[in-house]
Every structure is written in C-alpha cells, then in structure tokens.
C-alpha cells in the first residue's frame, strides 16, 4: 500500500486586498485569501480554488483566520491549512500556508494566548492509504504556533497518531486570558475521541501551560456517549466548559462538561436540551448542527445552535418538512440553562432554513474588549430561502444559498434587522465532500474594537476558462447597531 504524502513549504504571502464582487450586499466584505494549493502526491481528487471551514480570533487589532484549502472531492478533508492575518482591524490582510504540512487535513481552529503572546492553530492530520477505508487511517492532532500571526511553526503533535481503530474528531482550542483567573495562561484543546473496537466515545482535554509548546496527558470525560465539541467556554473564575452536541446519555442532545481545576479532571456531562434539527431541506449540504459558544465579562455563557422546535412538523432526528431557526440559551454556572429562545431573523412560518451559526460576545475576556457592561451578541449564519422545495440538480428548483448576520446590543433581549451579507450562491458552485456540498462545519463572529466582524466561505460562479470552482474566505465588517 502506497502512502501519499506531500511536504508543503510556506506559500508566498499575499499583501494586497482582493476586489469585492459587484453583487455583494455588504460594503465591508473583503476576500482575504485565495487557494493556491497543490495535489498531495498523485491525488487528483483535490478541488482547487476552494477554501472552506474558517475559524477566526482577534486580539486588539490583530485578527487571525485559518481554513482548509483544496477540498478533497470524495472525502471530508483538504490538502493544506491556510491562514490569513490582519494587523489593522481587518482593513488589509496577508495570507499563506502552515509550513511543513505533510498529510490531509480537516478541522482547524485558532486562538490566542495572552500570557505567552502566542497564536495557536490546531488541526487534525490524516494519512490516506489508497486501498483502505478513509476512516481507518492514522489520525493525529497537531498544533502550529506564531508570535505575530504571520510566521508559523511546523506543526507538532499534541495527541496521536491513532492508527486503524480510532478517530480524533472535532478539536477545539481556547486559552484562559483573564489575568485574575487562577489558571491564567492555560490553553486547552478539547476533542472527541472515538474507539471503533469498543464503541466508546469520550470528550478529552489536554492542557498547555507554556503557550502550546508542551501538552499534558488528556483528561477524559466520565461519559462514554460523548458527542462532538462545538466550542469551549472559559469563565472569568477559570472554570472551563466543553459545549458539545450529538452526545450525552439521552442522545441526541446538547450538553456541557465542566472542569473546575484547570483541565486536570472533567465532570459528568450536563444536559442542556434535546437537539431538534431537520436535515431534509438543505439541498444535500453538509450542515451538521454544531453549537457555538461565547462568554460575557461577568461569566454568562451563551450557546447558539440551529434548531427547528418552533416550526411545525419538527421531530428530533427526523427529516420531515421543517425549516430550522437559530436559537440560543444561557447559563451562569454551566449547569442551569435558560429555556431555548428563538432569534427572530424572519417569520416563524417562513420557508427560510437557517444553519451553521457562530456567536461572539462583546465585552468578553475571549475578545479582550470589556468595554460595555451590556452583552452585545454577534451571530453569523447561512440560510436557504427555498428549503422545502430546492433540489441542486434540478434547474427549475435551484437551491439559493445566502450568508447572513444579526446582532443584539442587550444580551438577546432585542435584535437588529438581519443583514443579507452575500448571495445568492448556487450550491453546485460549492466544494463537494463525501457528506455533501460544503462551506463549513463552524463559522465565527468576533469583536474588534467593540465592532462586530464575521468570516464566511463564499462561492462565485466557476471560472469559465478553466472550469475550476471559485470558493474563497471572506471577512465582513459591520457597523450596524444603536451604540456602535
């Protein structure tokens, strides 16, 4: 069996801004990167000019974004991990690739460690064996470090490799940046650890006290039915919460897992709510309802997720006829959660289907802008306007995909009018994977100098000369809101 591998050096950095598409709705929408990936080995399944699954974090005026380049058509990974960094609050950007990458990659997340002034990008690497099932190949979680968001280290292992009987899935990274926290300077990587032999599925956490140079042995959740991590929430007192979905003793459910001792141990999972999500209406898109989490300066945890419970014909796990909303819940202790609340993006009887959402909290430690006692919320998402009838393969019933944004200046008590950021997009212009057409598993909102920004994977029509797709990463800067 031949192992296809590649050794990729840092690509040349792009320092110029890209032209805005003439049909974009938002003045502050900027393309921040372009896919220049190459085929790993002799692989011909790489879809060039595709960038997906962005993650973004901000410290001061520095914004770092990471994403996948060159999505693989018959799998769920990509050929390279890219980055794009702005040092002026999103006005200009520089782009490149993580050096020394030598595998296929999926899932990458970025965070910042204030104590050690270090940027961290984590990723899952997988060696592909031509004759084996995709999920039976060795996987390894890796980390790349940077002091300026531009010069990145060759990835080093955090956990793994897991060979042939397991899978490292859905990692998330976050650092405790509160100088008054007893665990200030700890960085945490949380993930889902699957064992195919025993069927066990745990959520694990590894802690680094030195800016990602070294990582401790994993703390393992007591639950054996853990699901996929959708976010990590760190309160000002240093308490760490893993926010997950697809797991818990009452599948399917959203749940939280607390560590009160700096990642040394994990408590039993806490039930948040049963998951209600309809997969039927998204036009063969890959759109799992992963939660997104943020924490306010006073410790309030916000969790945002797609959900169909306020619509008719909505049943957990059933693909029948219902559009999804974006909903949220809050908790001060990670144990007691408020009832699920619908974000009023449009009418409850609309045919608009909302999915893949991210949340940022203004005034949070994570965003390092504690400038407002009221909690500002920024939520970005995707939506389809014709979810019940769309079929991407039929010209008379196209699936029209959009990117959207909505915000609140008072912790969700009231909401701005929604913004149509981008679209319509033809779903057939997106990268395709083994699980459907793809923009992202997760997307991210942030605050920069108190103003919301968001990142998206967006597609224009393919190049008519080459036939290549034209899907890239865009940053959106917003000025709406009564006090911005």
Image (spheres, grey):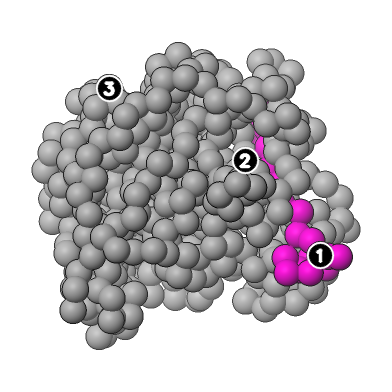
- Helix, strand or loop for the magenta stretch, by majority: loop
Q: Position of residue 399 (x, y in %)?
A: 76, 59
Residue at image mark 2: 380
Question: Position of 199 compared to 473: left or right?
Answer: left
Callouts 1 and 3 close, C-beta under 8 Å: no
Bin the neighbour count of mark 3 within 10 Å (Cα to Cα): few under 14, some 14-19, many 20 and up: some
Q: Is residue 329 above or below residue 436?
A: above
Q: Is residue 127 above or below residue 39?
A: below
Which of the labelled discs sits on residue 395, or is there none?
1
Q: Nearer the viewer, residue 331 or 118?
A: 118
User: Dividing the picture into quarters, in which one does residue 95 lie?
Assistant: top left
Which of the labelled discs sits on residue 148, or is there none?
3
Which of the labelled discs sits on residue 14, or is there none?
none
Q: Who's the residue at 41% across and 20% down the image?
A: 15
User: Dividing the picture into quarters, in which one does residue 400 lie?
Assistant: bottom right
- All told, the count of numbered labels is 3
Task: Answer with mark 1 or mark 3, whichever residue precedes in sequence.
Answer: 3
Question: Position of 388 compared to 354: left or right?
Answer: right
Q: Who's the residue at 67% across and 57% down the image?
A: 427
Q: Which image quarter holds the N terminus?
A: bottom left
């Amino acid at each position: 069996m031949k192992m296809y591998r590649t050794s990729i050096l840092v690509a040349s950095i792009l320092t110029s801004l890209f032209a805005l598409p003439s049909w974009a709705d938002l003045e502050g929408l900027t393309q921040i990167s372009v896919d220049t990936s190459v085929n790993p080995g002799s692989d011909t399944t790489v879809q060039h000019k595709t960038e997906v699954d962005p993650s973004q974090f901000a410290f001061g005026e520095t914004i770092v974004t990471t994403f996948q380049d060159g999505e693989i058509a018959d799998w769920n990974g990509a050929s390279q991990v890219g980055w794009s960094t702005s040092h002026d609050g999103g006005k200009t950007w520089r782009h490149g690739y993580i050096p020394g990458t030598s595998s296929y990659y999926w899932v990458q997340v970025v965070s910042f460690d204030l104590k050690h002034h270090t940027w961290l990008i984590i990723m899952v690497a997988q060696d592909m064996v031509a004759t084996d099932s995709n999920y039976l190949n060795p996987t390894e979680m890796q980390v790349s470090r940077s002091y300026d968001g531009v010069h990145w280290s060759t990835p080093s292992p955090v956990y793994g490799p897991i060979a042939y009987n397991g899978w490292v899935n859905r990692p998330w990274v976050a650092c405790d940046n509160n100088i008054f926290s007893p665990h200030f300077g700890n960085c945490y990587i949380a993930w889902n650890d699957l064992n195919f032999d025993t069927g066990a599925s745990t959520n694990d956490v590894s802690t680094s006290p030195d800016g990602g140079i070294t990582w401790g042995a994993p703390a393992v959740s007591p639950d054996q039915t853990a699901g996929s991590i959708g976010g990590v929430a760190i309160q000002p007192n240093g308490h760490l919460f893993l926010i997950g979905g697809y797991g818990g003793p009452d599948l399917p459910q959203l749940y939280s897992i607390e560590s009160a001792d700096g990642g040394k141990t994990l408590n039993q999972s806490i039930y948040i709510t049963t998951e209600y999500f309809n997969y039927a209406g998204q036009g063969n898109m890959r759109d799992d309802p992963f939660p997104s989490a943020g924490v306010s300066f006073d410790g309030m945890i916000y969790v945002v997720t797609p959900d169909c419970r306020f619509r008719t014909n909505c049943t957990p796990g059933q693909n029948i006829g219902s559009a999804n909303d974006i909903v949220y819940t809050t908790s001060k202790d990670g144990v007691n959660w408020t009832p699920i609340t619908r974000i009023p993006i449009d009418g409850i009887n609309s045919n608009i289907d909302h999915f893949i959402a991210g949340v940022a909290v203004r005034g949070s430690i994570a965003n390092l802008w504690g400038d407002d006692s009221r909690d500002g919320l920024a939520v970005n998402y995707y939506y389809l306007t014709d979810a019940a009838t769309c079929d991407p393969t039929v010209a008379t019933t196209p699936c029209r995909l959009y990117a959207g944004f909505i915000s609140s200046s008072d912790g969700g008590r009231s909401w701005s009018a929604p913004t149509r950021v981008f679209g319509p997009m033809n779903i057939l212009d997106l990268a395709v994977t083994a699980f459907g057409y793809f923009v992202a598993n997760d997307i991210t909102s942030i605050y920069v100098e108190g103003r919301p920004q968001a990142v998206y994977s967006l597609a224009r029509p393919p190049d008519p000369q080459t036939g290549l797709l034209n899907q890239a990463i865009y940053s959106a800067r917003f000025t709406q809101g009564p006090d911005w």
